Amino acid sequence: MSDTPILEICIDSVASAIAAEQGGAARVELCQNLFEGGTTPSMGTVYHALQRVGIKVNVIIRPRGGDFLYSEDEFAVMQHDIVTLKEMGINGVVIGMLNADGTIDIERSSQLIELARPLEVTYHRAFDVTADPFRGLNDIIGLGVERLLTSGQEPSVLEGVELIAELVRRAGDDIIIMPGAGITEKNLPRIIRETGAKEFHVTGSAPVQSKMEFRNERCFMGKALYPPEFSLKVTNPDKIRTYCGILAGSN
């Protein structure tokens, strides 16, 4: 396992993929619906991201927001998406499935991993809502995936830092433990120091105003929470450069 720290950027657009590469990131996790924790992006988004950047593009395989207990139809969708995305030339997939009792769904996860190979496989934050993190870690190691994305079963990495450090210790060289959720330029040095992790998952986004001149602000396309119609969150290359500088200085 390399000692060089790796920065992965969670993104939801081609523009953010380009910005992540400009900022020096090694890899992106391409999603849509980041408000829901990320769902599988459109095939068009994946295709054009692959055309526009040279860094590694991993894609989340998650048919909806909410929990990680999937129906047979949803599982079939996940299988089909993996086959299609693999043919497109992505670097890896990001998966996670649970049983109703909060354990890792080993059987169906194994089927997805087999479909994905030889691509990289990351197990995502479904792990963070497992009933027993150490049993979950052992199960995920047994699946043979490359890495586990986790916030330490807390809302943010800072709150879960003690568990993450213990996961890193227990994992050894069997799997990469990648902290993600709530990492900022200010807390990244502490997270590096206290977890011992070598890969880090961040967003690094900033608001970008819409170029629309006419705006009907009485009408919203979303529901209830009304996300802003005339502002987008896009990865900021300067923020990514800052993160990369912090990682380089820690090595």
Image (cartoon, rainbow, N blue to C red):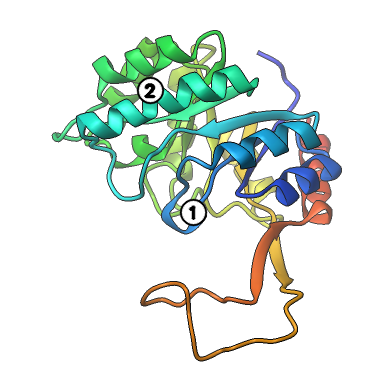
Residue 79 tag number? 2
Circle 1/circle 2 CB separation < 8 Å: no
**x 47%, y 47%: residue:** 38
**Residue that label 1 marks:** 33
Residue 201 shows up from this direction: yes
Q: Taking 130 as reference, is 226 left or right?
A: right
Q: Amino acid at mark 1?
A: Asn
CA gap, disc 1 to disc 2? 20 Å
**x 44%, y 41%: residue:** 162
Q: Amino acid at mark 2?
A: Gln
For the C terminus, the quadrant is top right
- In the image, 14 versus 129, the foreground residue is 14
Q: What x and y, as percent, mark residue 4?
A: 76, 24
- In the image, 222 versus 203, the foreground residue is 222
**x 49%, y 12%: residue:** 174
**x 73%, y 43%: residue:** 17
Query: In the current view of this chain or complex, which residue is farthest to the bottom?
Result: 218
